[in-house]
């Protein structure tokens, strides 16, 4: 496994997602919306990552999948990180799920060689456009229901518009 000084895994684990969640910049759902799959085209971001606090996190591809990873924190707690590719190249919906809870966190990201950009969502703006895509979103960016999975993915693709989101952080892996 490769070790990187910048913590991509920590961001995916929630060190970024939790502050975004508290500030209302991610969405939630009562249940997982992204299925673990062996047929999704997602870059394998497996590896060990060390953050600025010298804490090491690991991402391991979940057996039998190409889009889900077990993310292990230094305290051995684990989360499942799943990625759903969107229509435009290198764009993904990120789903973070604690295996012991039903609720999931959702946001969007771009993956490029050696670089992950995580976005925060302008919940007020995305709530205003949700109906166009057949979504019902309640207080706090909680997706209560949606008409179809393809329309939900179209919604997240639309969220890349600067009216609806902005890059919260970009993490670049150190060159070997």
Image (spheres, rainbow, N blue to C red):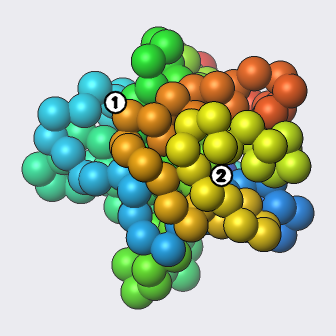
Q: Residues within 10 Å of mark 1 (few under 14, many from 20)?
A: some
Mark 2 vs mark 1, CA separation in Å = 18 Å
Q: How many marks?
A: 2
Q: Position of residue 85 (x, y in %)?
A: 40, 29
Q: Disc 1 on helix, strand or loop? A: loop
Q: Quadrant of the N terminus?
A: top left
Q: Quadrant of residue 115?
A: top right
Identity of the residue furthest to the top in this view: 89
Instruction: Give the numbered dot on residue 42.
Output: 1
Q: Residues within 10 Å of mark 2 (few under 14, many from 20)?
A: many
Task: Answer with left or right where residue 116 lies relative to residue 154.
Answer: right
Q: Position of residue 26 (x, y in %)?
A: 71, 55
Q: Position of residue 116 (x, y in %)?
A: 61, 31
Mark in front: 2 vs 1: 1
Q: Is 13 or 150 nearer to us in this picture?
A: 150
Instruction: Give the numbered dot on residue 11.
Output: 2
Q: Quadrant of residue 39?
A: top left
Task: Answer with left or right where residue 26 lies relative to residue 155.
Answer: right
Asked if one can make out residue 26 in the rendered structure from this viewpoint, the answer is yes
Residue shown at 88% from the left, 63% from the top = 23
Vertical placement of residue 154 versus 34, above or below: above
Q: Disc 2 on helix, strand or loop? A: helix
Q: Are marks 2 and 1 in contact (CB under 8 Å)?
A: no
Residue shown at 54% from the left, 81% from the top = 75
Vertical placement of residue 59 versus 160, above or below: below
Q: Is 53 or 7 nearer to us in this picture?
A: 7
Task: Answer with left or right where residue 170 lies relative to residue 46.
Answer: right
């Amino acid at each position: 496994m490769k070790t990187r000084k910048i913590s991509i895994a920590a961001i995916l684990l929630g060190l970024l997602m939790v502050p975004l969640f508290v500030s209302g910049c991610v969405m939630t759902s009562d249940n997982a919306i992204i299925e673990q799959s062996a047929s999704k085209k997602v870059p394998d971001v497996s590896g060990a990552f060390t953050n600025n606090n010298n804490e090491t996190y690991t991402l391991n591809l979940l057996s039998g999948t190409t889009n889900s990873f077990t993310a292990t924190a230094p305290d051995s707690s684990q989360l499942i990180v799943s990625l759903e590719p969107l229509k435009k190249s290198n764009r993904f919906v990120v789903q973070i799920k604690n295996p012991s809870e039903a609720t999931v966190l959702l946001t969007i990201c771009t993956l490029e060689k050696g670089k992950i950009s995580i976005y925060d969502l302008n919940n007020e703006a995305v709530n205003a456009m949700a109906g166009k895509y057949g979504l019902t979103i309640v207080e706090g960016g909680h997706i209560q229901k949606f008409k179809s999975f393809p329309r939900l993915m179209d919604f997240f693709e639309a969220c890349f518009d600067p009216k609806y989101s902005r890059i919260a952080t970009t993490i670049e892996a150190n060159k070997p």
